[in-house]
Image (cartoon, helix red, strand yellow):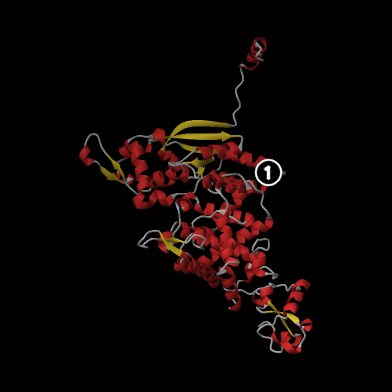
């Protein structure tokens, strides 16, 4: 039986007939000529907010090969008049400022600090324009505006023009080579603009993600515009000048440095730096780099102070060391080695890491401040890992002639062909517990050569371990008078001293007379 009541419906229609549906996102669409678009960017009436509402600047993509992509865009716009396919989208700055102010007023929101940072930036931009109502934020079209339209008006590249009256005069022309009559024809070419006025930040973000600028947004780009603490932590770290330099060298200039393994999703103009930093943060929290779905969930998680500090400190340590010693870039060889560096430094500095006990035994965890020679520290780690990665014994042929070699299943190199949780666990084992114990061996070398100085806490040997040593009457190489002192009167000696990275593992312990142990010291 239908619940529809004809009489009741008549009354409702009468009551609602003069009302308008309230929408969370209002869009005003109009056309604007390209000369005015360029002027609005130049006087900063239109701005971009790359650390939130805008995709990464793709200047290199639009200007390489003599501005090939920019010329293609402008030729299409001028010759074919494809204005209907080239819409741009802006959101009112006044609206976003109001939304941020409302977020700040809600003191229970975990986004208050983020909102304050953004609000300050937008208020400064509005002040420069002189009228907040005029300020617009570009959310789609920045690269076309700046590198295609803007650079053409700056005479940085020419475009192809054909003329009806005299086809023989057709050719390639810079803007200032053209007479005023033709300049005006180009100036007045129109592009459709969508001006968004929203009462909901999430709706603005949904609109951004739904757009594309020639190609769909990657999962990384979608995450980077989310309004969460994780998004702002990663975006701000990526914007650090030295961190930005590092990822430019690794993800953009990788061919110059001989770095392989930089696949499409890691290209810098696709925000590959954001992807790697997301994976690093996921590792700092969960000790694996995470799947695409797990990285999506990461952006919804709350931040813990200790994890955040550790994550930022390690990233900046790596970036600063490479920036100070640029020759190290040649030692990377494979992109995954950057991730291995992060794994190594997390194991070394995080007591909560699952490999902590196997790495140090009972010693105090290392601090980044304990590294005395950062260059040699990174160099030794990289060279140790690369040597094992290219070990001929870990390669097997895939054809009868043996011309093509691939990593042997189960080898260190094999577990770099993917980064599933099982692969990361296997890498950790090769670093600490499985031969050749790459990290543990390198760490011992560094402590012996005073590259790393460790502040340590000596832990008591438990009774069960001491009893086992007494039963074995296990002597050390330094002990020469074992027969004269009963085992139960001897003291426990560390074969590799604690101060040099030795642990309380049974394999590193022996018995020695108190007198000899004192004279041996940290030898």
Q: Which residue is drawn at 76% across and 85% down?
A: 514
Q: Count the marks: how many?
A: 1
- Residue 124 rendering spot, x and y as whole percentages: 58, 47
The residue beneath circle 1 is 104
Q: Which of 451 and 511 is in front in this view?
A: 511
Q: Where is the C terminus found, in terms of image quarters?
A: bottom right
The relative height of residue 256 versus residue 120 in the rendered view (above or below) is below
The relative height of residue 6 versus residue 341 in the rendered view (above or below) is above
Q: Which residue is drawn at 41% across and 47% down?
A: 147
Q: Is residue 65 visible?
A: yes
The image quadrant that residue 33 belongs to is: top left
- Residue 447 rendering spot, x and y as whole percentages: 61, 75
The image quadrant that residue 7 belongs to is: top right
Q: Where is the N terminus found, in terms of image quarters?
A: top right
- Residue 512 rendering spot, x and y as whole percentages: 72, 84
Is 313 left or right of 471, judged from the image as shown?
Answer: left
The image quadrant that residue 185 belongs to is: top left
- Residue 318 rendering spot, x and y as whole percentages: 55, 64
Q: Which of 511 and 113 is in front in this view?
A: 511
Q: What element carries label 1?
A: helix
Q: Which of 400 and 411 is in front in this view?
A: 400
Q: Which residue is drawn at 56% across and 49% down?
A: 291
Q: Is residue 366 visible?
A: no
Density class for disc 1 (Cα within 10 Å; few <14, some 14-19, many ≥20) is some
């Amino acid at each position: 039986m239908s619940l529809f009541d004809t009489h009741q419906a008549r009354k409702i229609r009468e009551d609602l007939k003069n009302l308008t549906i309230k929408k969370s996102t209002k869009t005003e669409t109009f056309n604007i000529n390209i000369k005015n678009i360029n002027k609005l960017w130049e006087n900063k009436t239109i701005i971009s907010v790359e650390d939130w509402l805008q995709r990464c600047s793709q200047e290199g993509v639009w200007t390489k090969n003599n501005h090939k992509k920019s010329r293609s865009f402008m030729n299409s716009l001028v010759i074919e008049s494809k204005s209907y396919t080239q819409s741009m989208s802006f959101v009112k700055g006044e609206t976003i400022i109001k939304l941020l102010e409302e977020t700040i007023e809600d003191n229970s929101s975990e986004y208050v600090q983020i909102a304050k940072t953004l609000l300050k930036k937008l208020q400064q931009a509005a002040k420069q324009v002189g009228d907040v109502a005029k300020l617009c934020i570009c959310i789609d079209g920045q690269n076309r505006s700046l590198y295609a339209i803007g650079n053409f008006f700056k005479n940085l590249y020419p475009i192809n023009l054909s003329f009806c009256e005299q086809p023989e005069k057709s050719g390639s022309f810079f803007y200032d080579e053209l007479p005023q009559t033709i300049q005006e024809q180009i100036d007045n070419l129109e592009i459709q603009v969508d001006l968004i006025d929203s009462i909901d930040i999430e709706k603005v973000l949904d609109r951004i993600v739904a757009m594309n600028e020639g190609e769909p947004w990657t999962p990384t780009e979608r995450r980077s515009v989310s309004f969460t603490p994780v998004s702002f932590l990663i975006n701000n770290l990526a914007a650090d000048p030295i961190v930005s330099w590092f990822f430019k060298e690794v993800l953009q200039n990788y061919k110059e440095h001989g770095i392989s393994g930089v696949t499409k999703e890691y290209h810098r103009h696709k925000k590959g730096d954001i992807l790697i930093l997301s994976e690093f943060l996921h590792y700092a929290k969960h000790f694996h780099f995470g799947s695409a779905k797990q990285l999506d969930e990461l952006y919804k998680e709350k931040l813990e102070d200790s994890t955040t500090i550790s994550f930022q400190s390690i990233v900046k340590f790596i970036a600063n060391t490479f920036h100070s010693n640029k020759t190290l870039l040649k030692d990377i060889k494979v992109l995954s080695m950057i991730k291995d560096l992060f794994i190594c430094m997390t194991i070394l500095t995080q007591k909560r890491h699952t490999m902590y006990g196997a790495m140090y035994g009972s010693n105090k965890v290392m601090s980044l401040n304990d590294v005395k020679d950062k260059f040699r520290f990174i160099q030794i780690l990289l060279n140790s890992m690369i040597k094992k990665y290219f070990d001929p014994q870990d390669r097997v042929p895939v054809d009868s002639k043996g011309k093509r070699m691939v990593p042997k299943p189960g080898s260190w190199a094999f577990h770099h062909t993917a980064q599933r949780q099982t692969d990361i666990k296997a890498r950790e084992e090769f670093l600490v517990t499985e031969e050749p114990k790459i990290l543990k061996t390198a760490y011992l070398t560094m402590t012996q050569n005073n590259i790393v100085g460790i502040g340590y806490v000596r832990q008591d040997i438990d009774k069960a371990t001491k009893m086992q040593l007494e039963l074995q009457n296990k002597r050390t190489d330094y002990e020469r008078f074992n027969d004269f002192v009963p085992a139960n009167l001897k003291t426990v000696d560390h074969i590799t001293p604690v101060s040099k990275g030795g642990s309380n593992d049974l394999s590193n312990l022996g018995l020695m007379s108190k007198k000899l142990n004192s004279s041996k010291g940290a030898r």
